[in-house]
Image: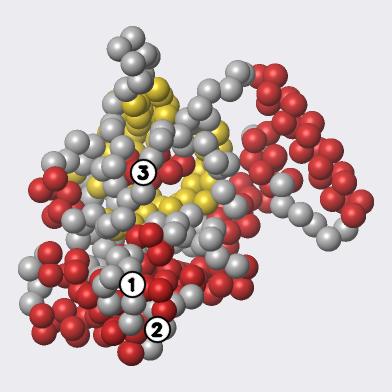
């Protein structure tokens, strides 16, 4: 894949550190991220990949203003948003949106789809007539029928609910969407459909994605560049084709070997290689956790 690039990155994260206060009076701070630096250009997808606990979701939350920035900076369109106020975040939500892993928990089950999609428009002061027109455009954009307007989230499949979540994220025509494991809860066929839809939307609108996933195959399919996270640090970063087929860091190699292959002999060899890499990495450094405890976030930025 190739992306349109700009002289100035749309999103620039520079030497980001995220720490949480430890529990107890004398508890030491808990460091979730250490010296993270990434860039995302206009119309580009950066795939952020790593196992559970690697810190990738914490990075997405920091970009969204949902995790504390201890040091470093997060710059969006040339403006530092590291410590943006609630009012600034509400204004920023026009250009920066999010799609969460579980669409059902992020969609109000008591609201009709039309109201869910119109909600961010109303918050931004857009009138009812214009909102209705925009909601119909959004349903067309994500290939949902017009009668979805008057139905509730429980009436849709997982893939359809994720399309609703994508439509809501697109409501204000954002420049960047943080996608936090958006297809991990879906079956393989539905995953492919949602990924292809996301690619088509990017081609049509020029939106950029920070695409967070634990699956290298998924990241390879949708990303222009890939950053690999391990224990709160980025250990490898580069073009998607290179990182996902010829990784240089042992951790990325381990992730690649985790994908099954149909040949039993090759699969056995991959398991052996993966165990060897895991043993080598375990000997290099002691384990320390990187993901901070998180609660369920039910609504997009407002």
Instruction: Identify residue for label 2.
Output: 144
Please give left or right for residue 34 compared with residue 83 in the image: right
Whichever of labels 1 and 3 marks the residue nearer the N terminus, that label is: 1
**In the image, what residue occupies the spot 33% across and 90% down?**
147
User: CB under 8 Å between callouts 1 and 2?
Assistant: yes
- Give the mark nearest the N terminus, 2 or 3: 2
Mark 1 to mark 3 CA distance (whole Å): 24 Å
Looking at the image, which is closer to me, 117 or 126? 117
Q: Earlier in the sequence, mark 1 or mark 2?
A: 2
Secondary structure type for disc 3: loop
Count of marks placed on residues: 3
Residue 206 can be seen, yes or no: no
Nearest the viewer among 39 and 261 is 261
Q: Position of residue 261 (x, y in %)?
A: 80, 57
Where does the image place residue 49, in percent across and percent down from the top left? 54, 46
Verify CB contact (< 8 Å) between mark 1 and mark 3. Answer: no
Image: 117 above or below 34: below
Residue 126 visible within the image: yes
- Few, some or many residues within 10 Å of mark 2 (<14, 14–19, 20+): some
Distance Cα–Cα, label 2 vs label 3: 30 Å
Viewer-side label of 1, 3: 3
Q: Dividing the picture into quarters, in which one does residue 152 lie?
A: bottom left
Question: Dot 1: within a 10 Å radius of its alpha carbon, few (fewer than 14), some, or many (20 or more) residues?
Answer: many
Label for residue 295?
3
Quarter in which the C terminus is drawn: bottom left
Q: Which residue is mark 1?
A: 167
Q: Quadrant of residue 162?
A: bottom left
Determine whether the residue tagged by mark 1 lies in a helix, strand or loop.
helix
**Tag 2's secondary structure?**
loop
């Amino acid at each position: 894949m190739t992306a349109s690039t700009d002289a100035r990155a749309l999103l620039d994260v520079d030497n980001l550190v995220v720490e949480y206060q430890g529990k107890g009076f004398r508890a030491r701070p808990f460091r979730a991220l250490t010296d993270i630096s990434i860039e995302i250009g206009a119309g580009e997808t950066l795939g952020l990949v790593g196992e559970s606990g690697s810190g990738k979701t914490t990075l997405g939350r920091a970009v969204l203003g949902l995790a504390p920035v201890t040091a470093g900076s997060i710059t969006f369109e040339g403006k530092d948003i590291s410590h943006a106020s609630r009012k600034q975040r509400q204004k920023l939500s026009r250009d920066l949106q999010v799609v969460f892993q579980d669409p059902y928990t992020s969609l109000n089950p008591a609201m009709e789809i039309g109201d869910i999609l119109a909600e961010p428009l109303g918050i931004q002061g857009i009138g009812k007539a214009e909102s209705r027109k925009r909601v119909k455009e959004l349903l067309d954009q994500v290939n949902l029928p017009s009668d979805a307007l008057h139905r509730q989230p429980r009436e849709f499949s997982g893939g359809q609910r994720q399309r609703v979540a994508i439509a809501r994220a697109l409501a204000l025509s954002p420049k960047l969407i943080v996608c936090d494991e958006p297809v991990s809860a879906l079956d393989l066929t539905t995953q492919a459909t949602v990924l292809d839809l996301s690619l088509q939307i990017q081609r049509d609108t020029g939106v950029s994605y920070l695409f967070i996933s634990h699956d290298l195959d998924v990241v390879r399919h949708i990303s222009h560049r890939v950053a690999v996270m391990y224990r709160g640090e980025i250990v490898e970063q580069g073009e998607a084709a290179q990182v996902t087929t010829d990784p240089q860091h042992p951790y990325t190699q381990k992730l690649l070997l985790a994908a099954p292959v149909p040949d039993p002999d090759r699969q056995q060899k991959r398991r052996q290689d993966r165990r060897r890499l895991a043993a080598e990495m375990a000997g290099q450094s002691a384990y320390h956790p990187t993901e901070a405890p998180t609660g369920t976030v039910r609504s997009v930025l407002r």
